[in-house]
């Protein structure tokens, strides 16, 4: 059952952010943080598949869609400021950050500040704390033009951002959201944010971390998956050993030392979240809800 969505205006630096809130007042609130070019709407199908008892919060990050008019800067620290302002402005008790790609990096920075009430962190194909060697200056310059036009977004969807071309109406929604960012916000992430090393901040995270990412398989490379990601990792800080992470009971594989690639997350495709949660055919896997099976909602 889908519960009613309410809109709350939360004050942030330079203005306000309209926040969508949904669900009953039970358990920790899931605070969704979208990818570069996404919006609050990116999470609609995910929220629809969650139990009604889950309280959710989602919003357009600074510089995007309804938050496009907010002034800069649009760097990661400012986005993390906004995220903390949202949870504090709503007066949330317990909450979990759920960050996708760029939103994962923003969530890590916000979590490193250890805001009161934070009980966990869920990272969906996150940008790793330490940028991989493939994120070269040339790569960043090319990426900065991915959202120049509807045509360039379409090309990025087909050849770079997704493991499989998304179908309608998802495709049109992604193109619309990708073009709804301000010029500075669109450039900030590919030119600077994606290359920012936030390893030290990640080492300060002291709550359990859940990672949904691609598991390397024989005959395949994680950078070019042919199927949706299926690796669920539940990791947590090791007492007395800063920066060291260990899998929690039942958490599966894929966690390790934070910094040498970011919780050992194979974040090759930041796009499955765009497509997989919205698939309805019974023969197709629905991956996203599995993330929340181990996230307490009540």
Image (cartoon, rainbow, N blue to C red):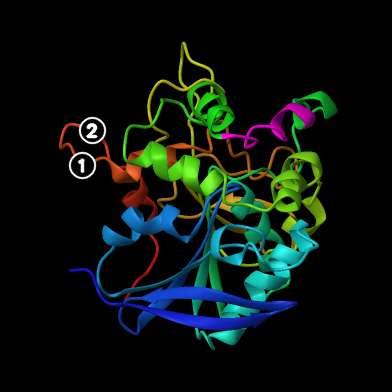
- Residue pushed farthest bottom? 91
Residue at numbered disc 2 = 284
Magenta stretch bounds: 141-149
- Residue pushed farthest top? 219
Query: Relative to residue 67, is residue 135 depicted above or below?
Result: above
Q: How many marks?
A: 2
Q: Is the magenta stretch mostly helix, strand or loop?
A: loop
**Residue at horizontal 41 percent and vertical 20 percent from the top:** 226
**Residue at horizontal 76 percent and vertical 51 percent from the top:** 184
Q: Judge by depth and name the residue closer to the eye, 249 or 209.
A: 209
**Residue at horizontal 68 percent and vertical 43 percent from the top:** 128
111 horizontally vs 47: left or right: right
Residue at numbered disc 1 = 280
Q: In which quarter of the image is the N terminus?
A: bottom left
Q: How dense is the environment of label 1, judged by Cα within 10 Å: few (below 14), some, or many (20 and up)?
A: few
Q: Quadrant of the C terminus?
A: bottom left
Query: Relative to residue 61, is residue 89 depicted above or below?
Result: below
The answer to whether residue 159 shows anywhere in this view is yes
Residue 97 shows which numbered tag? none
- Residue pushed farthest right? 137
The answer to whether residue 212 shows anywhere in this view is no
Q: Judge by depth and name the residue closer to the eye, 191 or 171.
A: 171
Q: How dense is the environment of label 2, judged by Cα within 10 Å: few (below 14), some, or many (20 and up)?
A: few
x and y, in percent, of residue 255 in the image:
58, 44
x and y, in percent, of residue 150 in the image:
53, 34
**On the image, which quarter does residue 60 sit in?**
bottom right
- Residue pushed farthest left? 282
**Residue at horizontal 69 percent and vertical 78 percent from the top:** 15
User: Do residues under tags 2 and 1 come within 8 Å of each other at their CB atoms?
Assistant: yes
């Amino acid at each position: 059952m889908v519960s009613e969505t309410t809109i709350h205006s939360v004050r942030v630096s330079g203005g306000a952010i309209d926040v969508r809130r949904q669900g009953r007042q039970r358990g920790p609130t899931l605070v969704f943080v979208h990818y570069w070019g996404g919006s609050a709407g990116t999470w609609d199908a995910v929220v629809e598949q969650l139990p009604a008892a889950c309280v959710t919060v989602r919003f357009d990050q600074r510089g995007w869609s309804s938050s496009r008019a907010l002034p800069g800067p649009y760097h990661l620290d400012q986005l993390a400021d906004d995220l903390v302002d949202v949870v504090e402005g709503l007066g949330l008790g317990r909450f979990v950050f759920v960050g996708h790609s760029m939103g994962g990096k923003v969530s890590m920075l916000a979590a490193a500040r250890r805001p009161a009430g934070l009980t966990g962190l869920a990272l969906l194909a996150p940008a790793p704390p330490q940028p991989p060697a493939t994120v070269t200056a040339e790569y960043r310059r090319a990426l900065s033009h991915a959202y120049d036009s509807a045509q360039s977004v379409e090309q990025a969807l087909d050849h770079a951002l997704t493991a499989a071309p998304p179908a309608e109406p998802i495709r049109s929604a992604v193109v619309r959201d990708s073009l709804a960012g301000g010029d500075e916000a669109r450039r900030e992430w590919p030119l600077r944010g994606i290359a920012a090393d936030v390893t030290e901040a990640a080492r300060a995270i002291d709550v359990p971390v859940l990672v949904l990412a691609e598991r390397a398989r024989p005959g395949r490379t994680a950078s070019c998956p042919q199927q949706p990601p299926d690796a669920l990792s539940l990791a947590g800080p090791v007492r007395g050993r800063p920066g060291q992470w260990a899998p929690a009971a039942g958490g599966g594989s894929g966690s390790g030392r934070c910094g040498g690639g970011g919780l050992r997350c194979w974040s090759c495709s930041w796009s499955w979240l765009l497509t997989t949660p919205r698939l309805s055919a019974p023969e197709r896997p629905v991956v996203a809800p599995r993330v929340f099976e181990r996230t307490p909602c009540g």
